[in-house]
Image: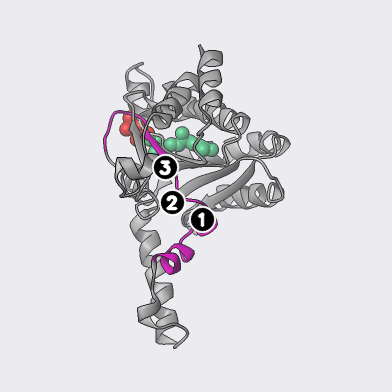
């Protein structure tokens, strides 16, 4: 099945440059199997590994994973602790493999919010892989899009206050430049697993013209075939960016 889907994708050719994923449904995957919620997160790591590998093989340039939102800090303390431990263990275990596969790791979000150990491991992982030229793997950690926009607006207001910029010069480009994602193209495809149909404070500015793909699959069940089907669905869309269908097909 996967081979056929891959062939179809490569023949069609219009592969998304940047895929962003809201990895939802770990808890419900675990509950459906009478397992503790953390087992869902643990199994979710296997999906992360598989999806990262396939994105690399398909030569997708950017993959952003919504790993821990600013709002996730409101979860029960014991779950937060378990996720942070899992994050630390995963980075330590996977970083050499990521490096070997030419993956460049980076983070969006407020890394300072994380406990010291995972924070340090992330910084080391980013440094170790910073010269790699393959897939850009971006983990959104303690990330909230509204918080990111506030940070950007404050920086811009500060420049205006200091006379370094005029308020009438504020443009889409200026705002884009002040975001965590300043070096990253906007996502072409945003996937949400777990059956919910919402964006949940993820890349609000950046996904103005992103194609959305929602699936009922829980994240631990989202593997190669599911990703390939999402890409095929994307390839069958017509991206109009506000223009008419006729204009786009000219
Ligand atoms: C959402 O499922 C999942 C999370 C908040 C955590 C996701 C984190 C991982 C899979 C670990 C990723 C690690 C790396 C290194 C990328 P949920 O708990 O909201 O599920 P539910 O909606 O069914 O309760």
Q: Is residue 9 or residue 132 the one in the foreground? A: 9
Q: Percent x, y for residue 68?
A: 43, 44
Name the secondary structure under disc 1: helix
Q: Position of residue 53 (x, y in %)?
A: 60, 29
Cβ at disc 1 under 8 Å from ligand 1 = no
> Between 185 and 28, which is closer to the camera in this rendering?
185
Residue at mark 1 to residue at mark 2: CA–CA distance: 7 Å
Q: Which residue is mark 1?
A: 111
Camera-nearest label, 3 or 1: 1
Segment tinted magenta in the rendering: 172-197
Q: Position of residue 48 (x, y in %)?
A: 52, 31
Inter-mark Cα distance, 3 to 1 = 15 Å
Tag 1–tag 2 contact (CB < 8 Å):
yes
Labels 3 and 1 touching (C-beta < 8 A): no
Q: Depth check: 204 or 139 in front? A: 204
Q: What residue is shown with label 3?
A: 80
**Can you say whether 212 is above or below 243 in the image?**
above
For marks 2 and 3, the one nearer the N-term is: 3
Q: Quadrant of ligand 1?
A: top left
Instruction: State the SS at label 2.
Output: strand
- Of badges 2 and 3, nearer the viewer stands 2
Q: Which mark is residue 142?
A: 2
Distance, label 2 to label 3, CA atoms, is: 11 Å
């Amino acid at each position: 099945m996967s081979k056929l889907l891959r062939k179809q994708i490569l023949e069609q050719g219009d592969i998304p440059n940047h895929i962003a994923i809201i990895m939802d449904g770990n808890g419900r995957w675990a509950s459906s199997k009478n397992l503790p919620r953390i087992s869902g997160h643990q199994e979710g790591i296997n999906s992360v590994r598989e999806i990262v590998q396939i994105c690399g093989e398909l030569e997708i340039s950017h993959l952003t994973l919504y790993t821990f939102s600013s709002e996730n800090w409101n979860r029960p303390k014991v779950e937060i602790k378990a996720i942070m431990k899992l994050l630390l263990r995963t980075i330590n275990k996977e970083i050499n493999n990521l490096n070997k596969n030419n993956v460049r790791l980076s983070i969006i979000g407020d890394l300072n919010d994380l406990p010291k150990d995972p924070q340090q491991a992330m910084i080391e992982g980013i440094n170790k892989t910073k010269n790699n030229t393959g897939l850009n793997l971006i983990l959104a950690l303690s990330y909230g899009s509204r918080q990111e926009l506030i940070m950007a607006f404050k920086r811009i207001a500060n420049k205006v206050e200091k006379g370094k910029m005029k308020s009438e010069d504020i443009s889409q480009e200026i705002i884009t430049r002040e975001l965590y994602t300043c070096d990253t193209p906007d996502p072409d495809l945003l996937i949400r697993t777990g059956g919910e149909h919402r964006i949940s404070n993820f890349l609000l500015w950046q996904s103005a013209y992103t194609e959305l793909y929602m699936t009922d699959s829980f994240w631990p069940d989202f593997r190669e075939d599911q990703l390939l089907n999402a890409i095929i669905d994307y390839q069958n869309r017509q991206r109009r960016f506000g223009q008419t269908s006729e204009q786009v097909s000219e």
